[in-house]
Image: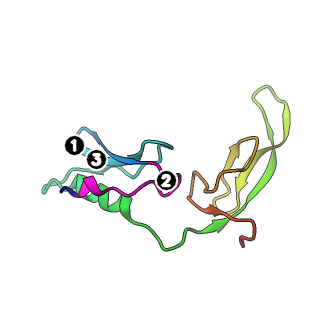
């Protein structure tokens, strides 16, 4: 069995992962949330697939914890939407979403937890 056949589920949403190819390079991508590993360029020993699979399958014991905060956001037409953006307490990335129900930050992977220390 090839190493790329043993891909772990997505660490962000739990979706199935699949190997992707472009030119002489490989990457792993979640079929559900489209999270993606870095693109590994083929080298002399043609191990791009194996390297991409190894990197995708790496996991830490515990993902970092954070919590969502809410901020006002200005729409393209200049309207201010109160508490329209959810902001990750770890990476500070803002996401326009009406509720902050994501269990993980789509940007950094932090697990959202009410009692998290920032």
Residue that mark 3 sits on: 26
Residue that appears at 34% across and 46% down? 18
Q: Residue furthest top?
A: 77
Q: Is residue 32 left or right of residue 84?
A: left
Dot 3 crowding, Cα within 10 Å, few <14, some 14–19, many 20+ = many
Quarter occupied by the N terminus: bottom left
Give residue 42's position: percent from left, percent from top. Answer: 21, 50
Give residue 72's position: percent from left, percent from top. Answer: 83, 44
**Separation (CA) of disc 3 from disc 1:** 7 Å
Q: Earlier in the sequence, mark 2 or mark 3?
A: 2
Residue that mark 2 sits on: 14
Disc 2 secondary structure class: loop
Give residue 48's position: percent from left, percent from top. Answer: 23, 53
**Separation (CA) of disc 1 from disc 2:** 28 Å
Residue 69 sits in quarter? bottom right
Stretch in magenta: 3-15
Asked whether residue 17 is drawn in magenta, I would say: no
């Amino acid at each position: 069995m090839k190493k790329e056949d043993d891909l772990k589920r997505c660490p962000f949403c739990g979706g199935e992962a699949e190997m992707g190819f472009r030119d002489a390079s490989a990457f792993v991508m979640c079929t559900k949330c489209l999270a993606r590993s870095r693109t590994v360029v083929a080298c002399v020993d043609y191990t791009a697939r194996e390297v991409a699979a190894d990197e995708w399958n790496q996991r830490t014991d515990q993902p970092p914890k954070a919590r969502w905060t809410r901020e006002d956001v200005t729409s393209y037409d200049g309207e201010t939407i109160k508490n329209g953006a959810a902001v990750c307490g770890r990476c500070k990335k803002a996401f326009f979403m009406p509720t902050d129900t994501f269990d993980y930050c789509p940007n950094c992977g932090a697990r959202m937890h009410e009692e998290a220390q920032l």
